[in-house]
Amino acid sequence: MSLLASLDPWLAHLIIGLYIVALMLFGGIVLAKARQSPLWVFLLLIPYVSVVAVYVFAFVRWPGYDTPPRADAGPGSATAP
């Protein structure tokens, strides 16, 4: 018997809900750091679409990593004077 099946229904639903919220929160943070729209995280809620969405996200161009650094990057830039 699984752990969730042995719990009260409201507690099992609470645990599943917290897992989904954490999954979407951390997915949104990763998408925001990759300079993508965090709204793409809602695709994780659709069963087979979520697998395709993660695959597409892995191979899409990432603006934060595909663009060359700017010359006026700031005080920690690697350009020599």
Image: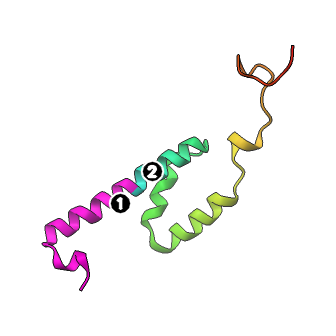
Q: Which amino acid does label 2 sit on?
A: Phe
Q: Give the residue displayed 78% in from the left and 31% down from the top.
A: 69
74 relative to 8, above or below: above
Q: Does the magenta stretch include residue 50?
A: no
Q: Which amino acid does label 1 sit on?
A: Ile
Q: Does the magenta stretch include residue 2?
A: yes
Q: Name the residue under label 2.
A: 26
For this view, does 23 lie left or right of residue 7? right
Q: Judging from the image, what secondary structure is the residue with disc 1 in?
A: helix
In the rendered image, residue 73, in percent from the top left (x then y), is placed at 73, 22
Find residue 20 and name its label. Answer: 1
For this view, does 4 lie left or right of residue 57? left
The chief SS type of the magenta part is helix
72 relative to 40, above or below: above
Q: Give the residue displayed 46% in from the left and 63% down from the top.
A: 44
- How many marks on residues? 2
The magenta stretch spans which residues?
1-22
Q: How crowded is mark 2: few (under 14 residues within 10 Å), some or many (20 or more)?
A: few
Q: Give the residue displayed 55% in from the left and 48% down from the top.
A: 31
